[in-house]
Image (cartoon, rainbow, N blue to C red):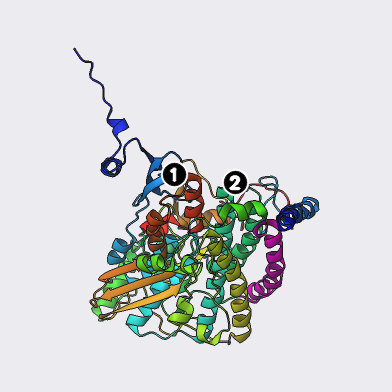
Amino acid sequence: MIKEALNTVSDLWSLMVGLRVTKDYFRAPQVTVRYPWKAVSNIATYKGHLELVGGKTGKPKCISCGMCALACPSNCLTVVKRKPPKPTPEEEQALAEAKAKGEKPKDKTPKDPEKFIYDFTLCSLCGTCMENCPVGALDFTGSAYLAGYSREDFHFDLVQLLKNQAGLEGMDASAAPETGQSEA
Amino acid sequence: MTTYQNNDHLAGDFYTQNFAKTAGEGNLILNLGPQHPSTHGVLRVVVELDGEYIMRAEPVLGYLHRMHEKMAEVKTAAQFIPNMGRVDYGHALGWNWAFVGAAELVGGIEVPERAEYIRVITCELNRIASHLLWWGAYLLDLGAFTPIMYAFDDREKILDILQDPTGSRLTYSYYRIGGVAKDLSADCIRRIQEFIPWFRSRLPMYKDLVSDNIILRKRIEDIGVIEQEVCRRFGATGPVARGSGIKYDVRRAQPYSVYPKLDFEIPTSNLKCARGRYDVRMAEMEQSLRIIEQALEMMPEGEVLVKGAPKPSWKVPKGEGYFAVEGARGKIGAYVVSDGGKNIYRTKLRAPGYCNLSLFAEVSQGTILADAVAILGSLDLIIPEIDR
Ligand code: SF4
Ligand code: SF4
């Protein structure tokens, strides 16, 4: 009988202890962020979609080797190589002379890709392509806020994207709209 | 003249019809799911009810089947790693490890020591995150809403830490054959060091807020008693087996990586009921903290990926191998058979949840419907993992 009463008391006490925790947290500062008025601050290391890394000249570092497209498990990458440029008449003559001398003509084709098609809808952000690029020409953006109206909005030409970025002087075209101050 | 009436939709599908054949007179056949009975995936359980009591139950699987094993046959070993992060969203790194470990075993690849420690640290962090997810979601299923808010506050901190090396927050693809993709940064290590004492201080709060609470105790004590013999018969592992008093943990039973060097205990409980499994998981989080603490101290400097690590075109040499790791839900295994070709000939994935779920049919017999949901939740099922 006494034991039962004691049990009831201790049972009720367990509820009081729980309420104490609730009370403490009731007074504690808010831990959530009022998105979209404020942006979260922890996305610096987040992997967004892929981008090409520009070299010094602003052209992509990529040498169109196609390793990334081969390595990708989901076949999201297509590298379109540049066609050799049409030689001018002088060059053609020089070429013919060189050939007559038995020299191998130099390949003047620019190495950077004409197009670098990237289908973000298929990408699993695994990083395999990046790790297998011999020149480190690929990187992930930190853009976590990418959104679009249709499937096609996620088919990028990364060369074009890089150009746009350069035009906007380092601004990320797909970055978040103004989200105000980020929460510290 | 009779009007044609199509009542097919009332007759149920194959499973229901087959199940109903042996139903008792006047019993009700009910489908729990396939949307959301208690777990957070698409599981369906057909039950036969006599009033409130469950006479029979039969889980129906396959709604989340994604052919991971088949996909392994059309990809090279390195290309298959991203799949492993998606088998089980709760403990993605455990699956990463199982497959990578099997491929290393067959390929005879050594993993640098630092990478082994990084694997231990990240895998244990992921285990805590997984247990927190279960804890919050389980209590949510039982009708307590706020605990998940506390759990996600802490889990968020782990996700922030893991986001640094892995780059993602849930479906990690971080381990590589022969190491890990990226070293832990100094900032990341500092954050882990800060996290350990902080999370330790949170555990008593969890105890005060929920574990000791009389409502929870009355709710989960003595329901879903799983005998050891049942565990063994169905091959249950992880907290389900340990909650029944079986001291089986792959980290100790089939030691791998650097676990033998680390000092930790395997919590078990003899309660055998849902409460036992609950206690085991809560104690495991503490042990994981201990492991991380030691691993951080013992971690040597050095490479994180072995030199000449396999490229995506790497062919797994002819042979076969089985590698098991202790996941948050039990023994995760990967069996790799290679004929030396471009792709692995066959990969078999052992999901702990599959075995843990299969004993539900037996355990739920004779319980009331509301308890069945609490039992399902206490098994910590992640349906994508069960279906694979
Ligand atoms: S991140 Fe992975 S899936 Fe995405 S393009 Fe690169 S290799 Fe393909
Ligand atoms: S991004 Fe790298 S791997 Fe891909 S084509 Fe360019 S240079 Fe080759």
**Which residue has dot 1 on it?**
B53
Task: Reply above or below: A174 against A134.
Answer: above
The residue located at (43%, 68%) in the rendering is: B228
List the single residue furthest toward the left.
B1
Mark 2 is on which residue type?
Answer: Gly
Q: Earlier in the sequence, mark 1 or mark 2?
A: 1
Q: Chain of mark 1?
A: B
Residue range highlighted in magenta: B185-212
Q: Is residue A113 left or right of residue B286?
A: left
The residue located at (50%, 45%) in the rendering is: B370
Mark 1 is on which residue type?
Answer: Tyr
x, y percent for residue A147: 53, 46
Task: Reply above or below: B280 against B265.
Answer: above
The residue located at (36%, 82%) in the rendering is: B105
> Which one is nearer the viewer's eye here, A39 or B27?
B27
**Which residue has dot 2 on it?**
B143
> Which one is nearer the viewer's eye here, B85 or B387?
B387
